[in-house]
Image (spheres, helix red, strand yellow):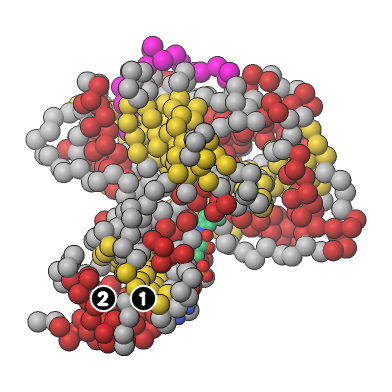
Amino acid sequence: MKPLGIIVCVKVVPKPEEVSVNPETRTLDRAKARSELNPPDMNAIEMALALRERYGGSVSLLSMGPPFAAPYLQVGLAMGADHAYLLSDRLFGGADTLPTSFALARGIQKIGEWDLVLCGEESSDGATGQVPAGIAEWLDCSQATYAMDLALLPDGRLRAEREIRGGHEVIAVSLPAVVSVKLGVNEPRFMDMELRRTAPAVTVWNASDLGVDPASLGFEGSPTVVGAVWQAKSPERRREFLDGTLQEKARLLAERIRALVSF
Amino acid sequence: MIPPAYAPDEARGLWVFLEQEGGQLEGVALELLGKGRELARARGILLTGLLLGHGVEAGARQAIAHGADHVVVAEDPLLAAYTTDAYTNVSARIILERKPETLLLGATPNGRDLAGRLAVRLRTGLTADCTGLAWEEGTGLLLGEVTGFGGGVMASIKCARHRPQMATVRPGIFPLPPSDPDHAGRIESVAVSLEAGEIRTQILERVRHAGVDITRASVIVAGGRGVKGDFGPVTELARLLGGEVGASRVACDLGWIGRDHQIGQTGFVTRPKVALVCGISGATQFSVGVKDAGLIVAINSDPEAPIFEEADVCVVDDLFPVLEALIAELKRRRP
Ligand SMILES: Cc1cc2nc3c(=O)[nH]c(=O)nc-3n(C[C@H](O)[C@H](O)[C@H](O)COP(=O)(O)OP(=O)(O)OC[C@H]3O[C@@H](n4cnc5c(N)ncnc54)[C@H](O)[C@@H]3O)c2cc1C
């Protein structure tokens, strides 16, 4: 079997609980939020490294984001990835899923030889989960979303176990393919300090390196626009703390529940 | 701008993609028809269902009874089970010919698999996982309300110049509309030109569990990492209360319980009258799935657990003795 060229698309996201809406400007306040690699992307990196161990080949990381994303890609390199590429340009900014998947697809083509693209199932900030299928469409290749397990079949196709509503299915898809990996399907490995020291630098490409029309990128290339933004409000809750012995708590609980449902 | 596949002034009607399994429509498809009916009425436009499959006449009739004016049916043995290529190719051909103004899809795994692919094929905008849909005053554009950052932030999104304006909606967001067997509508079969060679996916195995539907439960007893692998007391309590068992993502990831029990951003959005949340810390990604519950009871041994910020009734204690005492109390009071 020939070695696998694997590209993992990753995103640097603000920690969701640290993002708020500025009530005056009604815009997102991310200034205080620390960043991290999107958690499901960590599972995608781990899956890529495990596939490389099993079948041979290489693992490249690809991200689109501001220059500060580069050190987070180094985390992936220190986990064992071979190369890392960052698409960074103001022209990429403000992109919805259409230009995002387009830019990533062009980045993948520029990296060159590849058989498999892995993504996390969704990002913890946007949470659309639509980018992997979008990339597959731009690249005109097969896709397997919400995958839990991957292996190569003797005939060279990819076997993917994926989630469906209320169950799962096992599919075989031809390569090249784009796969989105479910959060939590494996235990991402720790960084290796030796690898961290020897890791190559992150290659940074801007819009003109990709040779694409700037009008199809970023905010300008996005069919959707964000109107109002506001802080989500959950209904006010009573926050009544129950005291007493276990039996007393149980009796109070039963009363509170009984007030709303008959059983 | 990425040029649109067709222009807004050529586009007509509100379409709902009708996901089916074995010829029966998925719950979320019916929920979308209910919401779609309301949206279509408000602007005096037609509500059309798009149904792909094999042997799906009953599903088409079900769609009409749930509010569709018109169902476009594409039947072919190659469409019996969902595959990305078959469903994208056939849907895209029909959409490019009929030019709907709006297309709604359920945000199930396959619904999202299709929506993400189709939106790029059609070079249009897609608003994913809407928690609300409305027409914008003045423009009549679809406004999708979405949550971001694990549920903490909300935004409204629209698609001004590209058609169809696409949106996905998770199961359980909109209520199930009543079925009216007398509602009239037209079922139209369209010819399918699909070759086996277009399909790059082969389904080797498919497992569907009998499946609970926690989106419609009126009582949910949910367990998380704190149950430490033992869903026994949680399940017994749910049974006593006539409810369903819910779970945090961690409990599902650890394989303690099936994925159809998962509540939250990547699970199901529920609106029970009562939710008992046991041994779950209350991360925003979990809480978005219960925030509309009538009453939230939290049982957690950590007084600092964030779940207590969002609960009506709070018990700071080990969940096992509390559940045991509550189960005993309920049994004692049983008539
Ligand atoms: C992109 C993304 C999507 C996600 N989607 C979801 C989602 O849909 N649903 C979801 O649930 N999570 C989701 N998560 C994960 C989420 O962030 C939390 O990690 C998860 O909800 C935590 O689960 P938990 O509360 O069971 O576990 P923990 O956070 O570990 O909490 C366990 C709790 O149990 C308590 N406990 C332990 N022992 C006992 C005891 N004996 N008695 C009483 N209490 C006890 C502890 O005090 C603690 O509060 C998502 C995360 C990401 C990044």
Q: Few, some or many C-alpha atoms within 10 Å of disc 2 (few <14, some 14-19, many ≥20)?
A: many
Of B186 and A222, which appears nearest the observer? A222
Q: Amino acid at mark 2?
A: Leu
Residue A49 is left or right of residue B247, and the answer is right
Quarter of the rendering containing residue B168: top left
Q: Amino acid at mark 1?
A: Val
Residue A88 x, y percent position in the rendering: 74, 34
Mark yes or no: residue B226 visible: no
Q: Residue at x 19, y 38 (%)?
A: B66
Q: Is residue B196 magenta?
A: no
Quarter of the rendering containing residue A240: bottom left
Q: Chain of mark 2?
A: A
Residue B151 is left or right of residue A184, and the answer is left
Element class at badge 1 = strand
Of B80 and B132, which appears nearest the observer? B132
Residue A147 x, y percent position in the rendering: 55, 54
Residue A215 x, y percent position in the rendering: 64, 19
Separation of disc 2 and disc 1 at Cα?
9 Å
Residue B279 x, y percent position in the rendering: 43, 73
Residues at circles 2 and 1 in contact by the CB criterion of under 8 Å: yes
Asked if B153 appears above or below B122 in the picture, the reply is below
Q: Residue at x 39, y 55 (%)?
A: B289
Region rendered in magenta: B1-17
**Residue farthest along the front direction in this orientation:** A24
Q: Residue at x 24, y 78 (%)?
A: A252
Cβ(mark 1) to ligand 1 < 8 Å? Answer: no
Q: Chain of mark 1?
A: B
Q: Which mark is residue B24?
A: none
Q: Which mark is residue A253?
A: 2
Of B134 and B2, which appears nearest the observer? B134
Cβ(mark 2) to ligand 1 < 8 Å? Answer: no
Q: Which residue is mark 1?
A: B315
